[in-house]
Image: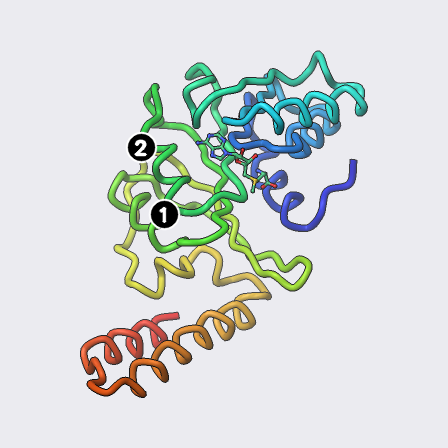
């Protein structure tokens, strides 16, 4: 199976894991790809909805890995046991990703997370900082006109710095990526537009404008 760029980046960050669980798997492509690599130990695919689990089952069967991938119909991390060293949560909003992690039914310390928030990255990053879950490395991927951040996190590790607002949106650890200038520009453009909106109001919110200008400088 050949993954698209976004999922390939997620799978690459998870590839060093031993027992790997993909939460919110949908199609199951990531665990199927990891099964194909032949390096992983246990592989689990979990989803809160039955349709995606059936689709993952079908895709795993078609790829010849039905017996290789454990499938769980469950909310967040509640279906899997605590023996998975690497947990993937990709394609979900940052808030939902943080909620799933906060409701983990086992201790996450020492575990590796591979996260690819679809939105609200800043909320997820702030959550990770508060919980001593440090981003170790990351990257930026562009696919079908959209741009995504992916990062690998070690749970139980304190951050070396407190991310400012700009760093919560684009963490330092992804800024070495060749796509960083493009991503920074796209993100800044969104906030410049918001500033224009604030400026055109009858009573412009000077504090809000200042905050956004500072955020743009931090990107
Ligand atoms: C947009 S899809 C992403 C699929 C895949 N991870 C990817 O990146 O392409 C989100 C998936 O997460 C599942 N999902 C949403 N909330 C969830 C939760 N609380 N626990 C587990 N899965 C959830 C949905 O059913 C859906 O299949």
Q: Where residue 166 sits in the image (x, y, percent)?
A: 35, 66
* Rendering coords of residue 205 (x, y %): 21, 80
Residue at mark 1? 124
Give the residue pinned by disc 2.
102
Of helix, strand and loop, which one carries label 1?
A: helix
x, y percent for residue 143: 66, 57
Dot 1 alpha-carbon crowd within 10 angstroms: few under 14, some 14 to 19, many 20 or more: many
Q: Residue at x 46, y 17 (%)?
A: 79
Query: Which label belongs to residue 213?
Result: none
The image shows residue 170, relative to residue 82, as above or below, that is below
- C-alpha gap between disc 1 and disc 2: 11 Å
Image quarter for residue 99? top left
Identify the residue at horizontal 70%, vertical 25% (top origin): 35
Residue at point 40%, 37% (across, down): 154
Q: How far across and how far down the image is residue 51, in percent?
A: 62, 27
Q: Earlier in the sequence, mark 1 or mark 2?
A: 2
Q: What element carries label 2?
A: helix
Along the viewing direction, whichever of 33 and 138 lies nearer the viewer: 33
Q: Quadrant of residue 62?
A: top right
In the displayed structure, 65 sits above or below 183; it is above
Taking depth in this image into account, of 18 and 1 the one nearest to the observer is 1
Crowd tier of the residue under label 2, counting other residues whose Cα lies within 10 Å: few below 14, some 14–19, many 20 or above: some
Quadrant containing the C terminus is bottom left
Residue 170 located left or right of residue 143: left
Q: Quadrant of residue 29?
A: top right
Q: Which residue is drawn at 43% across and 74% down?
A: 188
Q: In which quarter of the image is the N terminus?
A: top right
Q: Which is more toward the observer, 67 or 194? A: 194
């Amino acid at each position: 199976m050949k993954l698209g760029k976004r999922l390939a980046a997620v799978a690459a960050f998870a590839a060093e894991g031993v027992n790997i669980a993909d939460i919110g798997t949908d199609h199951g492509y990531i665990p199927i790809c990891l099964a194909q690599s032949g390096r992983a130990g246990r592989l689990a695919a979990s989803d809160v909805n039955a349709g995606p689990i059936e689709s993952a089952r079908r895709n795993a069967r078609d790829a010849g890995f039905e017996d290789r991938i454990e499938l769980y119909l469950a909310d967040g991390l509640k279906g899997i046991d605590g023996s998975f060293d690497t947990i993937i949560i990709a394609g979900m909003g940052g808030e939902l990703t943080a909620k799933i992690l906060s409701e983990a039914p086992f201790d996450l310390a020492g575990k590796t997370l591979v996260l690819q928030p679809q939105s609200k990255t800043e909320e997820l990053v702030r959550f990770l900082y508060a919980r001593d879950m440090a981003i170790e490395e990351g990257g930026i991927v562009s696919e079908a006109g959209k741009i995504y951040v992916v990062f690998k996190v070690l749970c139980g590790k304190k951050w070396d710095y407190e991310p400012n607002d700009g760093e919560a949106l684009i963490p330092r650890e992804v800024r070495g990526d060749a796509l960083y200038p493009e991503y920074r520009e796209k993100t800044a453009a969104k906030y410049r537009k918001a500033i224009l909106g604030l400026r055109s109001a009858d009573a412009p919110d000077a504090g809000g404008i200042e905050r956004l200008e500072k955020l743009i400088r931090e990107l």
